[in-house]
């Protein structure tokens, strides 16, 4: 029922291993949660681990964990709870319609080969249909060694495989279909080292780029899909903000994104930016929008805590394995 809670048995058990299908990741190096415990009916504690040398989520500005890891942690944690505790079948579609976080820039410092985190999760606005979970809102607090790291949350919808095929119709034919790979903008302009990780191609003006979709990317396209994954759009927003602010390694410690439509694979998606005004002492905030076929498909605002941290020069340490 809308706004209520799902009927379930209190488990109070801890998992010693998170199955990849619970977080929609096949590669063990991409699985962030390491276990979970149910604390109350709709509250959970999730343990997680961030590697310092992930091939895609590598350190930014030399010595900070990539703050987009906060977004990926929130995404995976929401899916874990939905599948493991609310009984959502792993073959169902899990679509994120909104995600936000605020991270502490100092707490993101890398000080070892990995960082162990604790994620406190509260689920609300649960809506069920025909006995299954349909909508799920989460609020999360991330801590590291007892220190506050970030807060955030998400809004997601779960759709059965049968209903999803009906909704998408002929669009399902795009599943696994190759997409022409556009020439990438120069990697150093978007805070990356390798062209394979660049998700922007040249556009029609200085503040507009075309989304570059690499369906073979091992992290952003973890499996064949019939539309562009949301994490690829988040990376496009970060790279567009980096370009707008002059290139380098952008540290977005605040992010708020909403998705309004599926981004299709067979039509150009245009990424535009606008630097939002603010006091000189504040960080740099960039609003990024995506448009496809004349419709806005997503809106994202990213903020860095200070101009000094907004864009750091790309050097040999700024993207250790980017």
Image: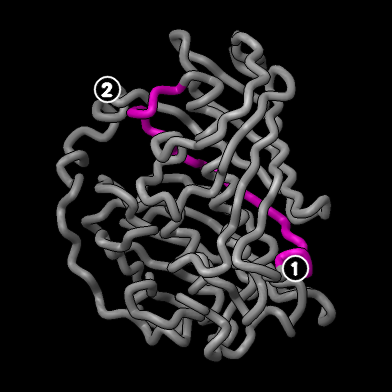
Name the image quarter holding the C terminus.
bottom left
Relative to 106, say whether 83 is above or below. Answer: above
Give how far across and how far down residue 285 sits, in percent: 68, 71
Give how far across and how far down residue 113 sits, in percent: 60, 67
Asked if disc 1 and disc 2 are in contact, CB closer than 8 Å, the reply is: no
Report helix, strand or loop for mark 1.
Answer: loop
Give how far across and how far down residue 99 sits, in percent: 59, 47
161 relative to 113 in the view: left or right:
left
Mark 1 or 2 closer to N-term? Answer: 1
The span shown in magenta is 88-108
Q: Which mark is residue 105?
A: 1
Relative to 65, say whether 124 is above or below. Answer: above
Eye-nearest disc, 1 or 2: 1
Give how far across and how far down residue 14 sits, in percent: 62, 27
Q: Which mark is residue 161?
A: none
Q: Is residue 202 visible?
A: no
For the point 66% across and 12% down, the residue is 10
Report helix, strand or loop for mark 2.
Answer: helix
Name the image quarter holding the N terminus.
top right
For the point 72% across and 38% down, the residue is 120
Q: Which residue is mark 2?
A: 162
For the point 38% across and 87% down, the residue is 186
Q: Quadrant of residue 205?
A: bottom left
Q: Is residue 82 magenta?
A: no
Q: Quadrant of residue 293?
A: bottom left
Q: Nearer the viewer, residue 195 or 2?
A: 195
């Amino acid at each position: 029922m809308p706004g209520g809670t799902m009927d379930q048995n209190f488990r109070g058990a801890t998992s010693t291993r998170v199955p990849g299908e619970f977080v929609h990741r096949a590669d063990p190096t991409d699985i962030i949660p390491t276990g979970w415990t149910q604390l109350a009916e709709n509250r959970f504690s999730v343990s997680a681990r961030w590697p310092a040398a992930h091939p895609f989520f590598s350190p930014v500005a030399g010595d900070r964990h990539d703050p987009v890891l906060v977004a990926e942690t929130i995404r995976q944690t929401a899916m874990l709870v939905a599948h493991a505790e609310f009984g959502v079948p792993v073959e169902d579609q899990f679509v994120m319609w909104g995600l936000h976080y605020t991270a502490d820039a100092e707490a993101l410092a890398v000080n070892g080969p990995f960082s162990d985190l604790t994620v406190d999760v509260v689920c609300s606005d649960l809506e069920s249909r025909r006995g299954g979970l349909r909508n799920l809102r989460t609020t999360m607090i991330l801590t590291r060694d007892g220190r506050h790291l970030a807060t955030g949350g998400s809004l997601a919808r779960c759709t059965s495989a049968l209903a999803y095929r009906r909704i998408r119709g002929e669009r399902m034919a795009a599943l696994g279909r190759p997409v022409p790979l556009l020439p990438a903008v120069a990697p150093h302009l978007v805070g990356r080292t390798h062209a394979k990780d660049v998700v922007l191609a040249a556009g029609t003006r200085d503040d507009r780029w075309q989304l570059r979709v690499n369906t073979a990317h091992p992290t952003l396209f973890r499996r064949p899909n019939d539309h562009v994954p949301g994490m690829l759009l988040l990376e496009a927003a970060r790279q567009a903000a980096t370009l707008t602010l002059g290139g380098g390694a952008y540290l977005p410690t605040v992010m708020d994104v909403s998705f309004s439509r599926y981004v299709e694979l067979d039509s150009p998606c245009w990424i535009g930016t606008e630097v939002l005004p603010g006091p000189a002492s504040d960080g740099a905030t960039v609003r990024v929008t995506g448009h496809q076929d004349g419709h806005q498909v997503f809106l994202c605002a990213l903020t860095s805590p200070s101009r000094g941290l907004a864009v750091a020069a790309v050097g040999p340490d700024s993207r250790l394995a980017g």
